[in-house]
Image (cartoon, rainbow, N blue to C red):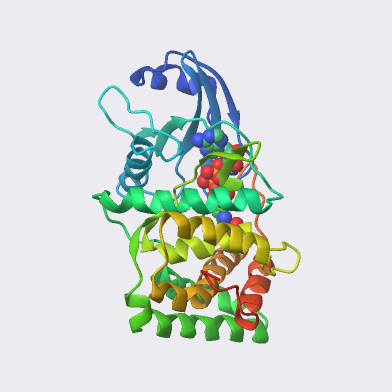
Amino acid sequence: MAVFTSVTLDDLSQWIKQFPLGNALALQGISSGIENSNFFLTTQRGEFVLTLFENLSFAQLPFYVQLMRHLAERGIPVPAPVPNDAGELVVALHGKPAAIVSKLDGSSQMDPQPVHCAEVGAMLARMHLAGQDFAMRQPNLRGLDWWVETAPKVLPHLAPETADLLRAELAFQQDFAGGVVYRALQTGPVHADLFRNNVMFVGARLSGCFDFYFAGWDTWLFDLAVTVNDWCIDLDSGRLDAARVLALTRAYHAVRPFTEAEQAAWQPLLRAAALRFWLSRLYDFYRPRAAEMLTPHDPTHFERVLRQRIQVQAPALTA
Ligand SMILES: Nc1ncnc2c1ncn2[C@@H]1O[C@H](COP(=O)(O)OP(=O)(O)O)[C@@H](O)[C@H]1O
Ligand SMILES: N[C@@H](CCOP(=O)(O)O)C(=O)O
């Protein structure tokens, strides 16, 4: 992330006392990421991550942090939120909602091979199953409604041919979401942003995944499509790499078998997942926010991915 809100060790000296973590010893801003202000925090009890939420409200946050707690309790390797002495997982810091979570071991695998993709697929399926009895509901706030609301804000910035693509894909997705195949898809709490930079590996073993702040109730298949569109592609062209797609989807299928509706919806949802990130990157690109350390993501990447998914048939889900 970028650091939008500065925090110093001095700011934490009193604030940290509400947590069972001892004194804050070191604090370091994290430059990757684009949504929140994140810091590595060392206390007398160990290493943690402090997040100040820049866009999410106190009302929206319980869904994310409770979901992380729910999954962590069921053995899914996600950061566990640390409650304060009153049992609260989200508390104010500099007037913004903030949370402390455990720090995961490992590092991102930015050049994934089939072996890494298989780990990701199996973990994603386990996460979906573990989320089935999660009691809270919140829609995916970057779902279809948001696409419809956001497209008119970016369309004036686009060249005519690019604007046509955006309008046409949005119409296609609205139509598909109204159909019987879509309505038959299994739903639940999904991560919705399981990119390479949100998963940790120690060697070839997946050690955890984080950044649940785009999570929401959506189809499991959309989550899989978001994941495949990042883990299993050639980043220059946006083309799918069949070996990685098969490794990831087969590992998922071995834990949670695909339904017929999911097989039929695969290509449209790969397109939906590309559209979702194309739109959010366009929105961030044309409406930048002030930040101390902000690296905007390139929208044209997901435009290429979307064009690929429209033009080229993806490997079938259970081939
Ligand atoms: N629980 C965690 N354990 C270890 N590192 C983390 C954890 N949470 C965040 N990070 C680090 O912080 C960076 C930014 O976090 P991220 O959640 O992607 O930010 P944003 O929400 O702003 O997009 C990650 O790339 C990772 O290096
Ligand atoms: N993964 C998204 C943006 C969200 O950033 P993250 O650092 O929170 O994963 C994208 O690539 O556009």
Residue 24 picture location, percent across and down: 49, 17
Q: Is residue 244 above or below residue 1?
A: below
Residue 79 picture location, percent across and down: 45, 36
Taking the image in four quarters, ligand 1 sits in the one at: top right
Q: Residue at x 65, y 43 (%)?
A: 293
Name the one closer to the observer, 154 or 33: 33
Quarter-of-image position of residue 101 = top left
Q: Residue at x 61, y 47 (%)?
A: 197
In the picture as drawn, the residue positioned furthest to the right comes out as: 236
Indicate left or right for 257 with 270 as reference.
left
Residue 85 picture location, percent across and down: 28, 22
Residue 272 picture location, percent across and down: 50, 73
Quarter of the picture holding the C terminus: bottom right
Q: Residue at x 56, y 44 (%)?
A: 199
**Number of numbered discs present?**
0
Q: Residue at x 57, y 78 (%)?
A: 155
Indicate left or right for 95 with 117 as reference.
left
Quarter-of-image position of residue 8 = top right
- Is residue 29 visible in this depiction of the protein? yes
